[in-house]
Structure formats: structure tokens, C-alpha cells
Amino acid sequence: MSQTYKHNSPFGADKDLWYMKQALVQAHKAASRDEVPIGAVIVNSDGDILARSYNLVEKSNTQTAHAELRALAKAGKKINDWRLDGCWIYVTLQPCAMCLNSIKISRCAGIVYGAESPLFGYHLDNSTEVSLYHRDTLEIVKGVHSQDSVVLLKQFFKQKRKHKSG
């Protein structure tokens, strides 16, 4: 896969921070529903938010309820097309391989994410990744509001462990 790393999206660093704050709001919604706190926001090429979503894996009993996949579905429904050409997705945690490939299939232009995912992030599968399209370029911006994302995740799992032992 050919990936280009940039310092910020076409919207600029200030907008990247603002969109990621919107994704963090979604992550907090997930946490309040006892879901792993991951949020996603999809923005079109004009900078308009098309979709907002959060993790619902536990409540839905399906791995396809990741925040990214739910946001892709909502954005596609909003514009009446599965092709999200020119769109960017902002997500609080590095996407897994399933989500990354769904984002690529949806033809998004790029991903901005907060925290790294050492257990499930797409980077673990880079050696076996296949190219989906002839022009298979996806811009990736990492580390936007990463500390906020990490703190939220750590607090969530600390609370889960506390309830389990108590």
C-alpha cells in the first residue's frame, strides 16, 4: 500500500484539531454506554461533517459496529452513495485492518487518528496488505489529540478492571 504521511489534512491543523474534538465527543458517548471509547467523524471535501459515530460492538454483538464502519455507513446514506471520494475520516484510535480496508474501499482521501493501537492497529498487517485499486493512495495523519484519546481509553479500561475485581 502506498501511504503518504503529512503533518495535517487539506483542512489545516486547526480544523484537524476541531474535527478530532468532535470525534472525541463521540468516543465519550461510547464510554457512557460501556463501549470501548472510540469515536469517528467523516468530513467531505468542503469541510462539512457528513457523519458522526461511536463504537457499539458490545451492544450490537457484532465486530462490524466499529465507529469507523458505522460512520462510513451513515455518510454513504447521507449522500446516497457508498463512494466517499474526497472525504476524510477522523477517528480517536488507529483503525484496525478491517476498518482501514473499508475506508479505502469507500474511496476516502485520508484518515486522521489520535492514539496508536499497539494491539489491533492496521500497522500490524502491513506486510500482508494488498492493493485495492490502481490508484491506491490514502493520506494518513497520526497523533492528533492523541493524549486525549489515550487518557480516555486508559480511564475506561481502568474502570473495567476495577469493576471486574470489585
Image (cartoon, helix red, strand yellow):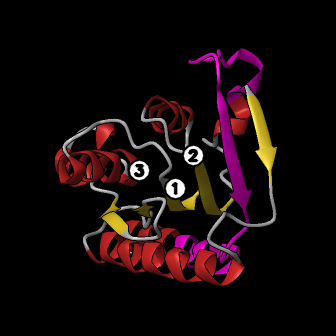
Mark closer to the chain start, 3 or 1: 3
Whether label 3 touches label 1, CB < 8 Å? no
Q: Residue at x 40, y 43 (%)?
A: 84
Q: Residue at x 23, y 50 (%)?
A: 79
Q: Is residue 57 left or right of residue 111?
A: left
Identify the element where label 1 is drawn.
strand
Mark 3 neighbour density, 10 Å: few (under 14) some (14–19) many (20 or more): many
How far is the residue under mark 3 from the one under mark 2? 14 Å
Mark closer to the chain start, 3 or 2: 3
Whether label 3 touches label 2, CB < 8 Å? no
How far is the residue under mark 1 from the one under mark 2? 6 Å
The amino acid type, in three-letter code, at marker 3 is Glu
The answer to whether residue 150 is magenta is yes
Identify the element where label 3 is drawn.
helix
Whether label 1 touches label 2, CB < 8 Å? yes
Mark closer to the chain start, 1 or 2: 1
Q: Which residues are magenta?
A: 125-154
Above or below 13: residue 53: above
Q: Which residue is mark 2?
A: 109
The amino acid type, in three-letter code, at marker 1 is Trp
Above or below 140: residue 112: below
From the image, state whether disc 3 or disc 2 is nearer to you. Answer: 2
Q: Which residue is mark 1?
A: 88
Q: Is residue 47 left or right of residue 166?
A: right
Residue 56: quarter of image? bottom left
Q: Which residue is mark 3?
A: 68
Mark 2 neighbour density, 10 Å: few (under 14) some (14–19) many (20 or more): many
